[in-house]
Image: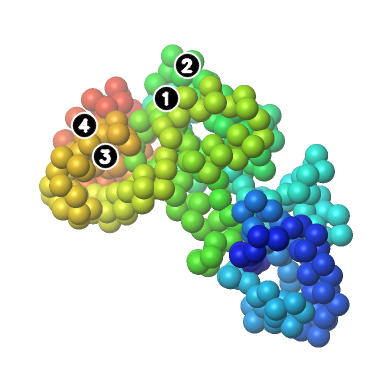
Amino acid sequence: MDIHTVDSDEFSAEDVVKAHMEDLAIQDQFGVKQLKYWVNEQAKTIFCLMEGPNKDACNQVHLQSHGNTACNIIEVGDNEFNLFMGQGAAVDDLAKTDSGDLDTGYRSILLTNIVCVSQNDSDYLTETHEIIKKYEGVLVLEPNNQIMAAFVNATDAISCASSIKALLDSTSDNIEFNLAVVSGKPVDEQGNTFFEETKAKINSLCSLGLNSRMYLDQETGTLSEKETLEQKEKRSNFTLINNDDFAFSLSLSNVINDHFTKSDFNSEELISLIGMSKSQASRKIKSLTGMTPNQLIQEARLQKALNNMSQNNKTISEIAYESGFNSPTYFTRVFKKRFGISPTNFVK
């Protein structure tokens, strides 16, 4: 799949249809088959799905037919493509939504971590799946305690996120969670994997602790405003994220992920590695996560421990040391204070 970014004031879907026909006329010469394409007239981007022997052959079709070569081409597996991009239909290979509008190729991705520390969480997972289905989302994957879903419409993703939070907030059980909605392109101008930039952004936000927050990026907000004017009230429940926030969250997430397993890693080292003054870093972290730098490091360790306890049969001591705690006793004390239950009883 490739991406074309067009620098022309005269760009239109009709121009892309014409270019696609030119591709079809010569594709056999390069052993390539054009399958489907997506047009975003406002962003002036085009995404083409094709089968071919290699990236160069796919690019040569565009080069020889009309000269508009791709900015980037990546390999995409059938299963991953169907989960993210399988919705809608096509008219002469041009992607359309179920309502008949142009499918821009952009997707809104929802990611949430949900941990129930007082009982089996299967009921909440089942209800979350039903909410995703209700709002036309497609369940993508469930690593560890995470649920990821893809939406064609940003409005549906926002409504889905709000409904999931309402579900989790309404229970008297001890539920820990975070949630984010981020929109983006299937192929970026740089990168090698599907929705690479979007996934990096949303994962960075959801790695910053189980703080019961919902994050929403500007792209999703803008897309939803084009779809409906009824979303502004729902967006007030989100922590809104701009490009500077993303840059900071990515840096913060990378530093913490690289160092939190060291028991001597602390806020001073964290602040030094992200290159900010103590007051500036503390203010940014508090605004983004609701936590102090030391609390954030401890939360990252606890989140790692929760994932390990949910997924493997390691001992509490092994999990404590692997999560950056300097002793199992200290880990047990911190865990019980945070979640109201001992690590041993949580595992049971």
Give the CA separation, mark 3 to mark 4: 25 Å
Count neighbours of disc 2 (C-alpha within 10 A) and say few if under 14, some if 14 to 19, many if 20 or more: few
Is label 2 or label 4 in front? 2
Give the CA separation, mark 1 to mark 2: 8 Å
For the residue marked with disc 2, what is the amino acid? Thr
Q: Quadrant of the N terminus?
A: bottom right
Which residue is at 46% across, 24% downward? Answer: 237
Question: Is the C-beta separation of discs 3 and 1 under 8 Å?
Answer: no
In the rendered image, the vertical position of residue 303 relative to residue 237, given as above or below: below
- Give the SS element for disc 1: strand
Query: Which residue has dot 3 on it?
Result: 284
Q: Which mark is residue 334?
A: 4
Left or right of residue 210, residue 30 in this image: right
Give the CA separation, mark 2 to mark 4: 24 Å
Residue 58 seen: no
Percent x, y for residue 31? 78, 81
Percent x, y for residue 135? 67, 31
Instruction: Name the outermost residue toward the bottom.
Output: 29
Percent x, y for residue 227? 67, 35
Is label 3 or label 1 in front? 3
Question: Is the C-beta separation of discs 1 and 2 under 8 Å?
Answer: yes
Query: Which residue has dot 1 on it?
Result: 175
Give the CA separation, mark 3 to mark 1: 26 Å
> Considering only order in the chain, which callout, 1 or 3, is on the residue closer to the N terminus?
1
- Give the SS element for disc 3: helix
Query: Which residue has dot 2 on it?
Result: 171
> Considering only order in the chain, which callout, 4 or 1, is on the residue closer to the N terminus?
1
